[in-house]
Image: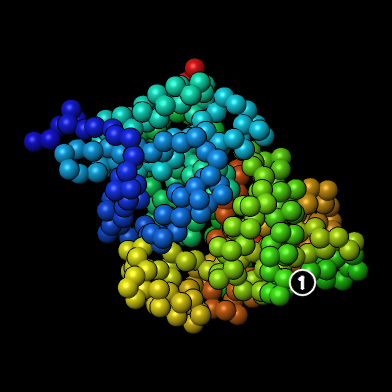
């Protein structure tokens, strides 16, 4: 009978091992009703430093846990030059943490990450993160009863104990809010007042994304995003190449009436973006598009089959935080995009992720009658 002594933690070096690293979650979580498999092609490109700008400058290593011929766990550990420039040079990160329910196995994987980070001269490990806070971050600690939506992570409940037993402590929590698009009416009085103010104010306006100038509007929105979120925990600015990559990746998913840019006093000040839950649309695919699932996906996307949506990106320029104009504009953007989503047949919309100390965004979610239904936790550990 195999024992923990038979487990080896091996460095990923070959294309075959990269594929095993990518395949593990699909084998590990298969049959779990709360796991929505992301597209394998998207996962592969996320890992690829040539195709994903967020991965291109990292110093990283990938590791597999192997018992005999079976792959039973994985972990990535890396340093991020963008984090070094914007925050500190002490921190390394771990991510892509998945494994069987064996406490010793989890300990071995996390210890290997510790060793790698120490060898790089780092004194702190943070995670889980998949390359940075602008990608997927956080360990799911609450909300295992519903599937993960597009570009949100999933994990088993036993991971929390593994990570904490390995000496990690909470750094910060992030919430996912869920809005029932057909509930919460009439809206709270404050919400109605803010929307009414924005509607009547000559200083506040908003418009749909312009399909003919798609890239320009994405660039404009991300300049607002970089300003809006710059003071938040772990923030990393979107560089130009990442913005171009984002525009290319999101173009098939974005409808112009689900992406709005708002102005205050004639200047771009806020934006909101709503997309369909690609994970829901790809249900039953096991993450595979070939040979015929790509056609099914396009059909489902165009025929309005998705009932779940997500707001992955929104922002209000810092100088308008807490102002009447800013609050009114954001409330109007939310209500406008929610109405567009209802017209398209969506039933639910996730707003994620929201830092636990971001009182302004939490208030906006609550005013939209959204409720927190998942919690993702970032952990940290001193290692030197």
Which percent across, then down, holds residue 318? 79, 47
Number of numbered discs on residues: 1
Residue 48 in percent (x, y) is at 46, 50
Q: Secondary structure at mark 1?
A: strand
| Residue 11 visible here | yes
Q: Residue at x 29, y 34 (%)?
A: 10
Classify 202 as above or below 30: below
* Depth check, front residue: 127 or 130: 130
Q: Is residue 295 or residue 171 the one in the foreground? A: 295
| Residue 335 appears in the picture as rendered | no
Corner quadrant of residue 364: bottom right
Q: Residue 116, image x and y in percent?
A: 42, 26
Tell me the quarter of the picture where residue 191 sits.
bottom right
- Local crowd size for mark 1, using a 10 Å CA cut-off: few (<14), some (14–19), many (≥20): some
Between 174 and 153, the residue placed more toward the observer is: 153
Query: Which residue extends farthest left?
Result: 1
Figure quadrant of residue 369? bottom right
User: Which residue in the rendered view is the most extreme toward the top?
Assistant: 384
Residue in the foreground of this view, choosing between 228 and 333 = 228
The x and y percentages for residue 69 are: 17, 43
Image quarter hosting the N terminus = top left
Instruction: Say which residue appears at 24% left-offset and 44% top-offset.
Output: 71
Q: Residue at x 42, y 55 (%)?
A: 43
Residue that mark 1 sits on: 207
Q: Farthest residue in the bottom direction?
A: 303
How is the structure coloured here? rainbow
Q: Is residue 243 left or right of residue 25?
A: right
């Amino acid at each position: 009978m195999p024992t923990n002594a038979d487990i080896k933690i091996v460095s990923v070096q070959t294309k075959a091992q990269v594929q095993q690293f990518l395949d593990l979650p699909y084998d590990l979580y298969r049959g779990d009703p709360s796991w929505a498999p992301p597209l394998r092609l998207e996962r592969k490109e996320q890992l690829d430093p040539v195709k994903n700008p967020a991965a291109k400058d990292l110093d990283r290593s990938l590791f597999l846990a192997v018992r005999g011929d079976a792959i039973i766990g994985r972990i990535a550990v890396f340093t991020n030059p963008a984090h070094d420039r914007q925050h500190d040079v002490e921190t390394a990160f771990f991510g892509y943490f998945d494994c069987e329910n064996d406490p010793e196995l989890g300990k071995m994987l996390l210890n290997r990450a510790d060793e790698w980070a120490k060898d790089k001269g780092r004194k702190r490990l943070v995670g889980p993160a998949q390359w940075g806070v602008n990608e997927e971050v956080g360990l799911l600690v609450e909300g295992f009863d519903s599937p993960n939506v597009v570009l949100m992570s999933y994990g088993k409940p036993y991971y929390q104990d593994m990570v904490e037993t390995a000496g990690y402590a909470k750094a910060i929590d992030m919430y996912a809010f869920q809005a029932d698009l057909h509930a919460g009416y009439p809206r709270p009085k404050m919400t109605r007042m803010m929307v009414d103010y924005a509607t009547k104010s000559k200083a506040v306006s908003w418009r749909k994304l312009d399909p003919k100038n798609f890239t320009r509007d994405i660039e404009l929105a991300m300049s607002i995003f970089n300003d809006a979120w710059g003071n938040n925990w772990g923030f990393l600015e979107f560089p130009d190449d990442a913005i171009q990559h984002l525009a290319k990746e999101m173009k098939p998913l974005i409808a112009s009436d689900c992406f709005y840019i708002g102005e205050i006093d004639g200047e771009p000040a806020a934006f909101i973006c709503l997309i369909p839950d690609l994970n829901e649309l790809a249900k039953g695919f096991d993450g595979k598009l070939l040979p015929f699932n790509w056609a099914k996906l396009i059909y489902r996307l165009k025929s309005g089959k998705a009932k779940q949506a997500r707001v992955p990106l929104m922002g209000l320029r810092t100088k308008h935080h807490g102002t009447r104009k800013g609050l009114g504009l954001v409330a109007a953007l939310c209500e406008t995009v929610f109405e567009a989503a209802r017209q398209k047949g969506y039933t639910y919309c996730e707003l994620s992720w929201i830092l636990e100390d971001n009182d302004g965004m939490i208030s906006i979610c609550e005013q939209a009658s959204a409720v927190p239904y998942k919690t993702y936790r970032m952990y940290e550990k001193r290692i030197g």
